[in-house]
Amino acid sequence: MSRLLIRIARMQVFACVSWMSALYLSGCTVVGPDYHRPRIDLPSSWSEAGGQGAGMDRAQLQVWWRAFNDPLLDRLIDQALLNNQDLGMALARLQQARAERIQSSSRWGPTVSIGGEGDSMRSSQMLDWPPGIGQSSTWRTGFDASWELDMFGGARRELEAADADIAALAADRHALQVSLLAELATDYSALRTAQARLLIANDNIRNLREGEALAERAWRRGLGSSAELAQARAEREAAQAQPPLLEADVLRSSHAIGVLVGGFPASLREKLTAPHAAVMTVPGLPSSLPSEMIGQRPDLLADEHRLASATARIGVAQAQRLPHFSIPVSFGTTASLVHDLFSGASLAWSAGLQASQSLYDGGRARAGVKVAQARAQAARLAYERDVRLALRDVEDALTSLNSERQRQASLVAAVTDSQAALDRTTRLFRAGLSAYLPVLVAQRTANQARDALTLSQGNQVRGAIALYKALGAGWRADEPLGFNRDSPPQNPWPVRQAVTVGP
């Protein structure tokens, strides 16, 4: 057994010497695969046609909310970018990762320490061996250094993975910003829509009161019935039940906005709940390609960086199976008297080269490589899945916009026709040529058409916001997201003629 161990040790020493010789002759080796962006066969255009639009460039996409031309929305978003707690936490996590990267990188450089010590001792003089020398003092001072050599590139792969993790966290922060701004704009649109519907509801109540008064006068003159008067009163009472619900919607939206901008729920209540009749209008929508969307969405960039990190960690795991080399260096002085510490005779130094290689670990290192490879495969599949989900988000947003656009055209016509019908039935009733029930029916139809049109306009605005979010708009590349590499991979999706997705 001892001979077998000696033979294995000799083989390991020979392997270490061979590895070192090869490295010095051919240069440093970096183990593990290099990262390459996965190639995905993307569609050349969106399946949903969006009409003809002017499109928006990258700078305009970064501040897409300004296309709504609403100064209050602009101020709210500026406040959210400064004060939102979720964005602040994401920044703190990013700063933590950068500090941890510095900690990690420091392990792979030389470690130098300086120190000194002094001790005094007395040995027994009653021993035959070793003979005692009585009392003695020893003083030491000097430097100690150690450097673990990155012969196989494991340290470089680990730092590459750390850089990719930092880039992924930065992309996560940008993805959070995209979602935050879309949520804030959606709540603001819901607020304006509820306020416009509230004005329509109050206008309807006022018209029903006037109609009820007409029905009561007609009944007193014998030109109407008590049933018509009761019906008019019931219509007015039912209409009065609608404003409290809409007022609650306004307050809930204002509360949500107050928290999103970093304040308390009621912080902006007075400013946001003032009567407002105008519904936000849809601006010119961006034109984009599926391939361009991939490069704009920060959540997909985060997936890509995590895949790069997982790929680099394969090299880290492979380096664990190879020999480890380090250089210990010591330099100092040793003397029995303090004033002799700085004499030439007290100098002492040592330097060496240490190498170690695991002979048997139960398959732990080999399994570590398989674990890293499996994690990289999972990260690649997650990236490919999220690309498809992102494409679905855009297609869904385009579908909603197109369907709402078609629906809105019918609602505009319905508002016009229902108002004409209301005017005609009212004139006939005032002239005594018609009962009041047709007036109530026309009034109900006209109010429902106006309310439905307002809802449709709000839905279209929210659809536009969803499209901006799906395209990854709303963040600035103030800091580079890409991890360090000499030659970034080429975009695997060829540039095609842009397909417009907005009206």
Image (cartoon, rainbow, N blue to C red):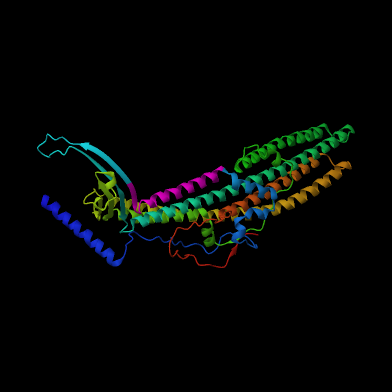
In the rendered image, the vertical position of residue 47 relative to residue 172, given as above or below: below
Q: Would you say residue 7 is visible in this rendering?
A: yes
Quadrant showing the C terminus: bottom right
Q: Looking at the image, which is closer to me, 417 or 162? A: 162
Which is more toward the observer, 55 or 232? 55
Side of 54 where 171 appears, left or right = left
Residue at 59% from the left image edge and 64% from the top image edge? 499
- Residue drawn at 86 percent across, 44 percent down: 428
Q: Whole-percent x and y of residue 246?
A: 69, 39
Comparing 78 with 104, the one in front is 104
| Helix, strand or loop for the magenta stretch, by majority | helix
Where is residue 299 shown, x and y percent of the image?
A: 50, 53
Q: Is residue 200 left or right of residue 325?
A: right
In the displayed structure, 6 sits above or below 231; it is below
Question: Which contiguous range is marked in magenta?
Answer: 85-114
Tell me which corner region of the image, top left, top right, bottom left or bottom right, holds residue 191: top right
For this orientation, the residue located farthest to the front is 339
Task: Please tell me whether residue 474 is drawn above or below residue 289 in the rendered image.
Answer: above
Q: Position of residue 93 (x, y in %)?
A: 48, 46
111 magenta-colored: yes
Q: Does 156 lie within the magenta span?
A: no
Give the image quarter of residue 272: top right
Residue 109 relative to residue 432: left or right:
left
Where is residue 281? Give x, y as percent.
69, 52
Q: Quadrant of residue 436?
A: top right
In this view, 97 is above or below 250: below
Can residue 383 be seen in the rendering of this structure? no
Most foreground residue, 64 or 487? 487
